[in-house]
Amino acid sequence: MMNESKRTASIALPQMRKWFAVKPLAVGISAIFLSGCGEEPELASIYTSIDECASDNPNYMEECTSAYKEAKDEALRTGPKFLSEGDCEFEFGQDNCEYVSNQGSSFFMPFMAGYLMSEVIDEVGDALGKKKKKRRYYMQPMFTSYSRRSSLRGRWFNASGKDFGSLGRRDVKVYQSDFKKKPTVNRTVKRGGFGKSVARSSSSRSFGG
Amino acid sequence: MLRRDIAPRQHWQALAQEYGFNFHTINGEPYWDESAYYQFTLEQVERDIEDPTQELHEMCLHVVDEVVQSPALLTDFCIPEAFHEAVHDAWLQRHPSLYSRLDLVYDGKGPAKLLENNADTPTSLYESGFWQWLWLEQCVDGGTLPQSADQFNSLQEKLIMRFRDIANIHQQKVMHFSCAQDSAEDRGTVQYLQDCAAQAGLETPFIFIDDIGVTETHRFLDLDDLPIHSAFKLYPWEFMLSEEFGEIAAYSSTKWVEPLWKSVLSNKALMPLLWSRFTGHPNLLPSFLHKDLDKVDKSGKWVKKPIFSREGANIMIIDNNEVVAQTGGQYGDEGVIFQQFHALPKFGDNYTLIGSWLVNDMPAGMSIREDNSLITQDSSRFVPHIILG
């Protein structure tokens, strides 16, 4: 006869996975939301292939190609990863996951469904103090889910889980402030009144016990 | 109680990455160690750990009830006078608590001895409630452990239930979560509690403790300038009270978890009080406040602990007035207690310490840490356990 169990009978494992945990973005081309794009929305387009991008932007085949490649690398680095194909398909749908081996570890990942590309024009001062305009491109890998169990089914989303709208949409607005929404409030707020007891250190050890 | 070797699961590091357990190795040293596990009988767990945990907890609350009403005792607990009223009110108004962990010395026979009560900011919760649960589940599925193997671990379901209760008591659907920066372990512990709270239906925004803002009208705000009505903080009350916002926090309308009365329950001055109120109890060790030291026989082995020490810092073992072991750290200015030395059991080269968890008032599970030294520090390793037979 079995005794009554002394442990939690079941745990919702999918809810414990952390593949949408905030991960640091690489600096450079991928750092779209951390770049100095201010509060003005930037228009960005989602492409599912290099050809699609190039047909929209006939003179920018090179940019379309390099953005695609960077997005693939970024997807590998920051995208959702699973040990089993079943767990990946639970989230992303059947036949939407591939086996990937990278730097000695292997796992299953959803296919990159597309990539977001936006053009940013920076004003750069030259040696004579004249303002010059400089074009730059930013990209992010995009994923989607075909799983009935996923709340992101049929949506575009990035590696940190941000929803960019339904698959039918290809032009989206991106804001730096999407990630930190700060409504303007007209009152004085003082910060930094907690935390001084903890000496800054690079240790990852606990201040608890 | 046995320590047994077992093969680590293949790819467990990749699994840890998938689940966001990113402090299994700390500063290059292993912290989670699944090359072994401890095996207990059901009787050992129920008779020697679970039941005494319940009883010790009730005794502790009995002492808290006495301390909060006595300015003299609160002063012995190094709680500044400015906060006496706030501590007292938090207790009388029964501000709800979430969890705590009793550290016990136990070797499989005889009564477990209480070393201290980590009631304010206990860590190693994720490893206990989720990660060792998953380890057992997979070892049973993989056939390396028998189907009948169980574990003393209902932490996760109890935490979820308790968050639901606290949300009802606070009448808040949103609970902010906070800890200090720069500790992956603390952030991981808080993330786990956010996950549990989310499963209880709460919204769980996160903010680092030093980002918390205060208005001129003494309301706490998050980085979106939204009010913090209810907040879990993995940050010690004694730190908070010594800091600029301390007084505002103690008397604010923000509901803190853990509540302010945990500054008494988690205080090491509790140990001498327990001993004086329940002298000779089999689960207690003789303990004394520094000021009472000349009233006691100091021969034999004693442990000197700062009242606010954490993670085994500034602990000294004294044998007939000679220091035989000690650890460094930055605690101790506030005052110390003396507790009779009771050696941790040794399994191979490992000294073993039991953590016995409570969620609110209910015993909820067990965790085991090993260290190579008699004083369990933050260099210790977490080893899973099973119940068999």
Image (spheres, rainbow, N blue to C red):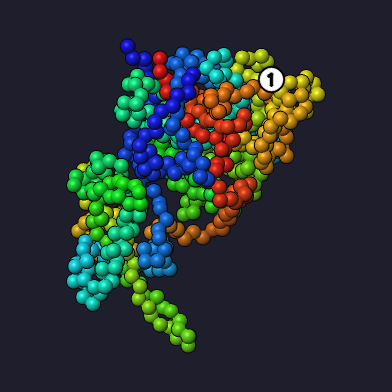
Which residue type carries mark 1? Pro
Parent chain of label 1: B
Count the numbered circles shown: 1
Q: Say left or right for B131 vs B101.
A: left
| Residue B236 seen by the camera | yes
User: In this picture, is A113 found above or below B177?
Assistant: below
Instruction: Look at the image and tell me in which quarter the N terminus of chain A lies.
Output: top left
Instruction: Look at the image and tell me in which quarter the C terminus of chain A lies.
Output: top right
Query: Residue B374's spot in the image, x, y percent?
Result: 62, 29
Q: Which residue is situated farthest in the top direction here?
A: A1
Front position in the image: B195 or B171: B195
Query: Residue A177's spot in the image, x, y percent?
Result: 41, 61
Q: Say left or right for A2 vs A169.
A: right
Q: Which residue is mark 1?
A: B286
| Residue B274 seen by the camera | no
- Which residue corresponds to the image point at 40% horizontal and 82% vertical from the top-left? A132
Query: Residue B288's spot in the image, x, y percent?
Result: 72, 24
Residue A112 occupies which quadrant of the picture?
bottom left
